[in-house]
Image (cartoon, rainbow, N blue to C red):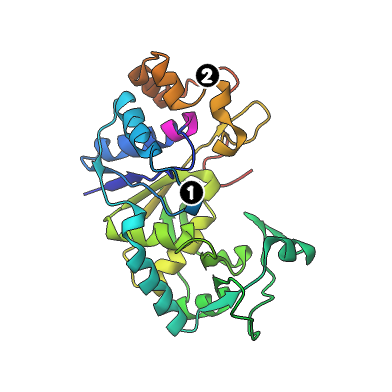
C-alpha cells in the first residue's frame, strides 16, 4: 500500500506552497488507495512554536484533506541518537566545531545547496569544550555503501552520489538531529513508501538514499514536485514573509475563503496572480 506524508515544521505559518505540497501528497495516496500522513517536525529548538500545530490541522481540514497523524519528531529523539551512535561506531561521523562565519571565511566552493564544507575538522583533535556538530564523512560513507540508486517518479532512476554536497551535518549543535537524519529515520519508522516533496530537496534525496543504505532502512520511491515561485522567480517560502502578501493559509481561512476551491485550483495549476509553478519538476534551475 502506498503511504505518503506531509511533514511541516512549526516555525512559521503554512502558506500556499505548503498547500500545494500537501495536496500533491494527499492526492497521490488517495488515487492509489493508500494513506496520507501528517508528521510535525518540531525539533528546531527555540524556532519551534507548538501553538502552530493546531493551525496546521485546521489549514489541512480547510483544504478538504484527510490524514492520519503520526508521532511528532520530538517524541523520537532516542532513535536519532541511536542512529548517530551507530554511524559514529562505524567510523562514518566526525565532530566539527566550525561556525558558519569560520566556514565562510575559508571561501569554500558552492554546491547545489550552498557552501560545501571543506572538511576542516576531519582528523583534527578538537577542543571538546566548544559546541560541536557531527558531520558525515562522505567519502568514507560512499566507499562503505558502494553503488546505489534511487527512483524518482518524475526523473527516473538516479545514481545516488551526494559527494557534491560535501560532509553534511547529521547532528546539529543546537538540535538532536539534522533534517537529513531525522526525516530519513522518520520516513522509515512511519512506513512511507512514496516521499513527496518539492524539487528544492531533490539533491537531499541523494543523502537520504545513502543513509538508508548505511542504516539498513527500507528504500521508498520519491516524487519531487514543482515549486511555487514568486514574480521574481524565487521560491515561495516562510523566510520571504509570504503571509504578508495574503498567501498564508490561516489568513486566507480566517478571511472566509473557500479552502476546497483553492485545493482544486492548485490541482489544476491555477495560481493566484504573481505566483507560478516552476518549469522544471526535479531539481533543475
Percent coordinates x, y for residue 145 in the rendering? 45, 76
Q: What stretch is highlighted in magenta?
A: 15-19
- Secondary structure that dominates the magenta span: helix
Q: Position of residue 80 (x, y in %)?
A: 38, 67
**Residue 16 magenta-drawn?**
yes
Query: For mark 2, what is the residue?
Result: 272
Q: Is residue 22 visible?
A: yes
Residue at numbered disc 1: 155
Q: Disc 2 vs disc 1: which is toward the camera?
A: 2
Point out residue 138 in the picture as x, y percentages from the top left corner: 56, 73
Near-viewer residue (283 or 235) = 235
Q: Is residue 94 left or right of residue 183?
A: right
Please determine whether, in this image, residue 280 is positioned above or below residue 132: above
Residue nearest the observer in this picture, 231 or 143? 231
Percent x, y of residue 142: 52, 75
Callout 2: SS: loop
Using the rendered view, name the quadrant where residue 229 is placed.
top right
Residue at (32% x, 24% y) in the render = 62
Q: Around disc 2, counting alpha carbons within 10 Å, would you say few (fewer than 14), some (14 to 19), or many (20 or more)?
A: few
Please report the residue visible at 45 percent of the width from the left and 33 percent of the height from the top: 14
Task: Report crowding for label 1: few under 14, some 14 to 19, many 20 or more residues within 10 A (C-alpha).
Answer: some
Residue 42, placed above or below residue 279: below
Task: Tell me which numbered mark, 2 or 1, is placed earlier along the sequence.
Answer: 1
Q: Which mark is residue 215?
A: none
In the depicted view, which residue is nearer to us: 115 or 125?
A: 125
217 vs 244, left or right, is left
The answer, for residue 159, to whether it is visible in the render is no
Q: Is residue 111 magenta?
A: no
The secondary element bearing badge 1 is classed as loop
Q: Residue at x 41, y 55 (%)?
A: 151
The C terminus appears in which quarter of the rendering? top right
Amino acid at each position: 500500500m502506498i503511504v505518503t506524508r506531509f511533514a511541516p515544521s512549526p516555525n512559521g505559518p503554512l502558506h500556499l506552497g505548503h498547500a500545494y505540497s500537501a495536496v500533491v501528497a494527499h492526492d497521490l495516496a488517495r488515487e492509489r488507495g493508500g494513506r496520507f500522513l501528517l508528521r510535525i517536525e518540531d525539533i528546531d529548538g527555540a524556532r519551534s512554536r507548538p501553538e502552530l500545530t493546531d493551525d496546521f490541522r485546521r489549514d489541512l481540514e480547510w483544504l478538504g484533506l484527510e490524514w492520519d497523524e503520526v508521532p511528532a519528531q520530538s517524541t523520537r529523539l532516542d532513535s536519532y541518537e541511536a542512529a548517530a551512535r551507530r554511524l559514529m561506531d562505524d567510523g562514518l561521523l566526525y565532530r566539527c566545531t566550525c561556525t558558519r562565519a569560520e566556514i565562510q571565511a575559508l571561501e569554500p566552493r558552492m554546491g547545489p545547496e550552498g557552501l560545501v564544507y571543506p572538511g576542516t575538522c576531519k582528523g583534527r583533535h578538537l577542543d571538546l569544550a566548544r559546541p560541536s556538530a557531527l558531520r558525515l564523512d562522505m567519502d568514507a560513507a560512499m566507499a562503505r555503501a558502494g553503488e546505489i540508486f534511487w527512483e524518482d517518479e518524475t526523473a527516473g532512476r538516479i545514481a545516488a552520489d551526494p559527494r557534491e554536497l560535501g560532509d553534511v551535518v547529521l547532528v546539529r549543535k543546537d538540535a538532536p538531529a539534522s533534517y537529513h537524519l531525522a526525516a530519513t529515520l522518520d520516513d522509515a519508522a512511519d512506513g512511507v513508501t512514496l516521499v513527496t516533496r518539492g524539487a528544492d530537496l531533490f539533491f537531499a534525496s541523494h543523502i537520504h538514499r545513502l543513509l538508508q543504505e548505511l542504516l539498513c532502512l527500507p528504500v521508498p520511491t520519491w516524487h519531487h514536485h514543482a515549486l511555487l515561485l514568486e514574480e521574481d522567480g524565487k521560491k515561495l517560502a516562510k523566510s520571504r514573509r509570504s503571509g504578508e502578501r495574503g498567501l498564508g493559509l490561516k489568513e486566507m481561512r480566517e478571511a472566509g475563503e473557500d479552502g476546497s476551491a483553492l485545493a482544486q485550483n492548485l490541482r489544476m495549476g491555477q495560481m493566484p496572480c504573481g505566483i507560478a509553478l516552476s518549469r522544471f519538476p526535479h531539481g533543475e534551475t
